[in-house]
Image (spheres, helix red, strand yellow):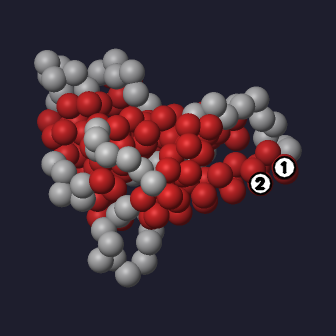
Amino acid sequence: MAYQLLSSIFQRYDSDLTPAEAHGIASAMLCVNGQIESEHWFKEAFNDEMDIVEEDKAVLIELFEQTRKLLNPEESVFEFDLFLPQDADLAQQAASLANWSKGFLWGIGYARSEGDWQGETEGILRDMVEFTKLDIEVEDDNDEDEDAFIQIHEYLRMAVLTIR
């Protein structure tokens, strides 16, 4: 599923969310409750009163359901990944990663409003708070920045598995 396609849908309906942030919300909701209906996520991504074309809605619901499938613990291979723009420069990818983290934290709060997170999960969530503050002033040709981005990206991918 192309990031740009989803981005154009979010822009068309004046959503305050980016596709990365919306995917973070969906991922968190599904980590807490793998049976949650896509309508809960959809209502958070778009105003309830908004009239969204069925074709656009189907694309969005497909993202949610594909995420559900990739987070399924019965899958033999953990293929889940953060939904970030692939063709963007490093600064845009870093901004999207920060937005994804913001969305994930919001989704965790939505799906699990009570209870304490303890141990490793508590540390992961604290790290995610820090990732929402990422310095996106990075240079594309800087190997250190690119390596750091790759490490954070992989950490988040594995963190989702741990939380799930």
Q: Amino acid at mark 1?
A: Glu
What's the residue at 19%, 46% (across, down)?
Answer: 38
Question: Callout 1: helix, strand or loop?
Answer: helix
118 over 87 or under it: above or below = below
Q: Are marks 1 and 2 in contact (CB under 8 Å)?
A: yes
Q: Nearer the viewer, residue 87 or 46?
A: 46
Q: Secondary structure at mark 2?
A: helix
- Amino acid at pointer 2: Asp
The quadrant of the image that shows the C terminus is bottom left
> x%, y% of residue 59?
26, 44
Q: Position of residue 159 (x, y in %)?
A: 51, 58
Vertical placement of 4 versus 68: above or below?
above
Q: Residues within 10 Å of mark 2 (few under 14, many from 20)?
A: few
Task: Compute the Cα span from label 1 to label 2.
Answer: 5 Å
Crowd class of label 1 (few under 14; some 14 to 19; many from 20; radius 10 Å): few
Question: Is residue 26 among what the camera can see?
Answer: no
Relative horizontal placement of residue 11, taking residue 42 as reference (left or right): right
Determine which residue is flagged by label 2: 147
